[in-house]
Amino acid sequence: MKSEKGFCDLGFAKVDTDRLRRRGFSEVIYCPGKTRSHLKKIVQTLIKNKQDILLTRLDKNTYTYLRRSFSVLQYNSLARLGYLCKKIQTRRQGLVAVVSAGTADVPVAEEAAVTLEVMGNRVTRLYDVGVAGVHRILQNLGVIRQAKVIVVVAGMEGALASLVSGMVSCPVIAVPTSFGYGASFGGLSALLTMLNSCSPGIAVVNIDNGFGAGYFASMINRS
Amino acid sequence: MKSEKGFCDLGFAKVDTDRLRRRGFSEVIYCPGKTRSHLKKIVQTLIKNKQDILLTRLDKNTYTYLRRSFSVLQYNSLARLGYLCKKIQTRRQGLVAVVSAGTADVPVAEEAAVTLEVMGNRVTRLYDVGVAGVHRILQNLGVIRQAKVIVVVAGMEGALASLVSGMVSCPVIAVPTSFGYGASFGGLSALLTMLNSCSPGIAVVNIDNGFGAGYFASMINRS
Amino acid sequence: MKSEKGFCDLGFAKVDTDRLRRRGFSEVIYCPGKTRSHLKKIVQTLIKNKQDILLTRLDKNTYTYLRRSFSVLQYNSLARLGYLCKKIQTRRQGLVAVVSAGTADVPVAEEAAVTLEVMGNRVTRLYDVGVAGVHRILQNLGVIRQAKVIVVVAGMEGALASLVSGMVSCPVIAVPTSFGYGASFGGLSALLTMLNSCSPGIAVVNIDNGFGAGYFASMINRS
Amino acid sequence: MKSEKGFCDLGFAKVDTDRLRRRGFSEVIYCPGKTRSHLKKIVQTLIKNKQDILLTRLDKNTYTYLRRSFSVLQYNSLARLGYLCKKIQTRRQGLVAVVSAGTADVPVAEEAAVTLEVMGNRVTRLYDVGVAGVHRILQNLGVIRQAKVIVVVAGMEGALASLVSGMVSCPVIAVPTSFGYGASFGGLSALLTMLNSCSPGIAVVNIDNGFGAGYFASMINRS
Amino acid sequence: MKSEKGFCDLGFAKVDTDRLRRRGFSEVIYCPGKTRSHLKKIVQTLIKNKQDILLTRLDKNTYTYLRRSFSVLQYNSLARLGYLCKKIQTRRQGLVAVVSAGTADVPVAEEAAVTLEVMGNRVTRLYDVGVAGVHRILQNLGVIRQAKVIVVVAGMEGALASLVSGMVSCPVIAVPTSFGYGASFGGLSALLTMLNSCSPGIAVVNIDNGFGAGYFASMINRS
Amino acid sequence: MKSEKGFCDLGFAKVDTDRLRRRGFSEVIYCPGKTRSHLKKIVQTLIKNKQDILLTRLDKNTYTYLRRSFSVLQYNSLARLGYLCKKIQTRRQGLVAVVSAGTADVPVAEEAAVTLEVMGNRVTRLYDVGVAGVHRILQNLGVIRQAKVIVVVAGMEGALASLVSGMVSCPVIAVPTSFGYGASFGGLSALLTMLNSCSPGIAVVNIDNGFGAGYFASMINRS
Amino acid sequence: MKSEKGFCDLGFAKVDTDRLRRRGFSEVIYCPGKTRSHLKKIVQTLIKNKQDILLTRLDKNTYTYLRRSFSVLQYNSLARLGYLCKKIQTRRQGLVAVVSAGTADVPVAEEAAVTLEVMGNRVTRLYDVGVAGVHRILQNLGVIRQAKVIVVVAGMEGALASLVSGMVSCPVIAVPTSFGYGASFGGLSALLTMLNSCSPGIAVVNIDNGFGAGYFASMINRS
Amino acid sequence: MKSEKGFCDLGFAKVDTDRLRRRGFSEVIYCPGKTRSHLKKIVQTLIKNKQDILLTRLDKNTYTYLRRSFSVLQYNSLARLGYLCKKIQTRRQGLVAVVSAGTADVPVAEEAAVTLEVMGNRVTRLYDVGVAGVHRILQNLGVIRQAKVIVVVAGMEGALASLVSGMVSCPVIAVPTSFGYGASFGGLSALLTMLNSCSPGIAVVNIDNGFGAGYFASMINRS
């Protein structure tokens, strides 16, 4: 079905086919809570309307199901992202650094990094550089100072965002993760830490929202 | 006192005189909880080390006290900002829009707007365009679509950030305000709304933190 | 067992057989936490006392079990509602619109819509019109302005209720859903958003309570 | 200033002069956080555009100030409402009952009741009928059963809404109040009680939001 | 092992064998988190020291395991209680009423009722008399007014405790249950309701703690 | 005004004149949020209907005002209670112990103790026996073991209730107080401690609710 | 009054005169909530029983009052501590470092530092070394590595404790402060950060509890 | 891979090989969220760099997998700890007591105790001595008074830490556990109790963080 009024009405969904024109990137599909057949119809609609495809929180089995119909659909299992972009090429000039505090934060960091790559950004990854061993980040200052924008992913106490921000002159996007135990309360601890950073130059996205951070960083990098 | 190691140790404070070089803007002083004489000494130290001055949450009386010593110190009473920047001139090319939902959000919006101006950005203000009368924002789409970055300030349910973000292709920085009553819980309601926005392209700063939003927007605009 | 004093005492339950007379609709049975045999006895009691039947949160298997005894019992699997109403016919004159923000909110929206239909209302559905693409709702203004009462179902930031309310002159019943992730805290985010709406003309029911919204809307439509 | 595009831009505010046409009642002004001169200009703008006036949370001194310019402006000190409606007359046929649990809930109940009267509804008040002495409400069943819609105002445990709803066949709008102490947590206890009512037919507005309840009830009564 | 110093040290546990003498009832064993062999050793120790046995939250399978060693151990599966009291006989004169709001609250109510019976009290049960149909409780006033102490078990909004307390002259022990959905937050809603009751004469135990309510009621009845 | 139907309707209040007959004690008046003239009328109504008087949270100035009209009204400034009971005499046989953890908890403890005395109970006070110096309570075991019921008042961590309960065979009523700082969160810490006591035989009233604890204890003592 | 049983019963308080012998330091008096005359009697009792004196949260005026009776009583106004220790001398060998993140945290840091000094410890202070300018702490590593135990005081995001702990081999006691705004929620943000530190070797005391941190650090230093 | 700059970069992790030198104990590996092959590579790296091994929250199956490669790796299934320390011998002179309130707290207590033993401390265990039967702890005072530092592990109301601290002169490290039900809220109740202890000399670690408590206690014992 082709859209004439800026969206396609599938009954269960109104696919926003005007998004690419209006916002610079097509509608991104959050997969949880959608049936496989619904996802298939949405992808079909996006393809027919010449939109790029980015599917978040896509599990492996559903990807396998979708690939039967869309053989070119690509998948990153760690980031849980499915995508199909006509021209993934490094369009942006700036470099984006994705920094994570611990190894358990890597899936969320990868969701940010792959989102950035799908949207055409150059990305450098710097993982497991939490504040418990601060020499690991200090020795990599050269890398992060080259970045035009930095995504910092951290659970537990989330202190890494403040530390990084204090050493650079570019914006830092902080992603709290739900990783931790006890009084981390599903990421609330890291979220509050990041919102209350004493270092200006930090903005925060939702808990575990690697996609949102990557998308936001790409917008900055494009500007 | 001049700094040799990147900060000046005043005993009660270690003024970061390396900040301008390292981060592109001098250390910003948050005034609450500091005595007048402490503030005076900090400002003296910054001036001697050729740093710009930006004092946040500065009340009128303390400003009057400080101006006796620093006659060139400027003040914006609505934004509660004191500042002294050697060359406030429009250095950045991009336009930043500061949008507020209601009139009660204006002080926080002004804190963002004046911070942006002090840091050398061109700013356009669009106040009282909350979603209760959506024609007000729809008729101003032209203005906000010219912006390179947008700051949205809203209390109560904070829905304006999602609405604006859905219509533009630039990053939106959302500032929840503590304005509201009953179950707004001091801004928590607006904070959660903004963190959970269904529209990608939004990052959030702390409740009432107009300064932080302006600072972050300026970083984007500079890039 | 027939009731003489307004309820039937089954020991484990006191079925309110006076409800239809007193409140205009029979006692509605919330199924979770009740055994199959208890549900069967409750339905028997309601039928003997000439009450209508509405079973909420009824899972498919329990429905299959109950249909063996009550072959005329109907079921809507998406809305998880079982029902048996002697005269489902469009008794009310007003139209009720059920509006949802995203496709993941559809089950709760359907619970509201089917409840409304079982209670004899004309219903129009408008799904997936969230604020991330506001043109979808703006192009459907004609539909929602015909409604005598509107139910708005939304998770994540829940901003849709304020937007809709600001464009119409009828009451809006807002249903927060638990759909979302990170700091949505099981629907708390959407609940607070809706309670703090800057647009008057909104009242809120419990998280995911599509039935409650439909029931309340039907009461208004009847009046 | 006259509006041509549906609102008047006063700089600090964009007064919605299309509200009466679009929603059936003019924009209502929430006074806290606005300066006296801003309020005066807003009222002037509303009058020039032939809108009705309703000012909520208006304190006595500000009213005195405003009355110097608008001698016909009326005031109810208990409800903290200022108003000026060209034709306050009983336009609606239905009766609205405003019921409060305790004497401390009366100011919020009055805010609801006066809002209803200003909007042209017939109102009956029934105060101090909380569940600690249930005979008080049982002996007044006749009164509340005549109502087309009921507003129930209660703090502390907020149980009154469920009790009333269970005895009537019309919609009940519940208003939690912040009255209480200890673990009432500023009205949170009553709010949760009302959202979790076991009796269908209840919808809830924000804590202490008597105005919102009155406005919503008036919308139902008009339908 | 026999105790000489008031407890038996099993290494993993120090069984309090002085409890019956000191407090009037033996140590009650909360089963979750204990292995089967540990439970067996604890029961052995209690028997050897001539203590009564009451095991709470005992699942059926563990009971079956224990009965192999202690053939006289009794079990109530609804209340999840195992017990072995040398002389269960009606020792107390007063009657205790256990009242529940809904059928889903029955397991917690039974935990209270069976605890009371095991501790030698006369118990009357009155289930499913929630405030949505208040005539059910009003017609049973005679029963509850005979009680010397009343246990009220309710989830959702928990309003039943206030209603009952307001009609009787004996103490009411309120048990919030975790039954409910949405903003009931695992029983928090009912807990706050009961703590904030406007009716004096109510005290509250932990969420779902039927045992604690029964134990406390038995203490009152004994006095 | 004399009551014929069990209450007197003063407009702003419906005084429950049936309370003494129905519940064994007259309606108790919670003073905050009531005007002086309203309080005066309520007291007059209670006197005319031969009810006892108990006014809680009564400040000194309001008492002075009331005594002009009711010269026999008595007052306890520490407990903030006004009262007028025709026959305060020791009617109950049992002894009630009121135990407090710290000196800052004394006002709440006194509210409980004086309520008990006004209601005709023998009371013994044991103050400042918190667990930081456990020998203070251990040396007073004789006193508390004579009690038929014990009220334990504690702020901060509220551990005293568990300790006392573990050493006695009578019911313990726990009153959390809002005394404390930092993460005591206005008494929430002590409230949770008391609800989660590992020692059975404890029930809890609202934060700072000394009156409620005294009233409940009196009910037990009467039984 | 002299104590024979380990405490002195003043009625309103039971002063623990056994504390010095049992715990190594006398009972410390928390002043808020105590009347002046009560404080005076407590101090008298402590002196008569040859205890040291430490009064926390003592305001200046109350100190002035007490000094009239106890002319040797000393006072530190920043730390709000009154004290009188017979032999303040540097009894402990180890050095304790008190580190604060910002200048607004200094009063709490001073409460810790002076407590340590009163209890006979050598103390070094390092203030305003928060992570926004990490070179300030890195250049002072030599100082903090000499310490046997470190107290870290920080508000806002509280990240400093993790950073310090990661660089040293001694225990770190973290004190969250209530300094901050917006979503710092009275110190909750810093408290959660510190509890969730990814760096082992940190334990936490209550919000703003500088005294508790100093006392705990002194216990470690003594060992 | 050998480290030259203080860490080994494995891509997914940067193993801190400088930790033993810098902090006195090697980097401890928290296992959840790490794949088996990642864990294997991390252990290899630590061994090659002559670090001790301590793996926390290691489940049995993963241990079995790792032992195939590292046959000397030891395991304690109750404490869920894997370890390999070249010279586990009693290096410290002081005794550490690990005290638990109930049998359900034992796994967390064992995590603390085994951590202490692996780090070379002498440990004495005292389990199931909660305040419900206070004679159990009073009769063991001799044991705990020999300790140089005490770890107290408690769930539910967590009162044991205050009680123990009040009787000893050494530091107490409190570990709240998530054991409990109803309003224990996953350990929040015990956490708040311990933070708010009225007895000075207590510091708190995260909920269920037995490892952190053991590590911290070992640091004190070493000093």
Image (cartoon, coloured by chain):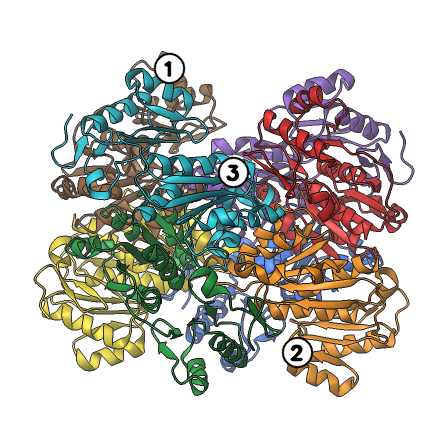
Chain colours: A red, B orange, C cyan, D green, E brown, F yellow, G blue, H purple
Q: Between F183 and B26, which is closer to the camera in this rendering? A: B26
In the picture shown, does residue E219 fall above or below G19?
Answer: above
Instruction: Name the front one of labels 3 and 1.
Output: 3
Q: What kind of residue is marked 1? A: Thr
In the picture shown, does residue B28 fall above or below H118?
Answer: below
- Give the CA separation, mark 3 to mark 1: 45 Å
* Dot 1: chain letter: E
Judge whether residue G199 can be spotted in this image: no
Judging by the rendered image, the residue that carries numbered circle 1 is E64
Q: What kind of residue is marked 3? A: Asp
Judging by the rendered image, the residue that carries numbered circle 3 is C105
Discs 2 and 1 share one subunit: no
Dot 1, crowdedness within 10 Å: few (<14), some or many (≥20)?
A: some
Q: Between G120 and A120, which is closer to the camera in this rendering? A: A120
**In the image, residue G140 lies at what x, y percent?**
82, 59
* Dot 2: chain letter: B
Q: Are marks 2 and 1 in contact (CB under 8 Å)?
A: no
Judging by the rendered image, the residue that carries numbered circle 2 is B77
**In the image, residue G196 lies at what x, y percent?**
64, 45
**In the image, residue C41 lies at what x, y percent?**
25, 23
Dot 3, crowdedness within 10 Å: few (<14), some or many (≥20)?
A: many
Instruction: Name the front one of labels 3 and 2.
Output: 3
Q: What secondary structure is marked by label 2?
A: loop
Q: What secondary structure is marked by label 3?
A: helix
**In the image, residue C57 lies at what x, y percent?**
40, 31
Instruction: Name the front one of labels 2 and 1.
Output: 2
Q: Quadrant of residue H1?
A: top right
B103 left or right, relative to A172: left
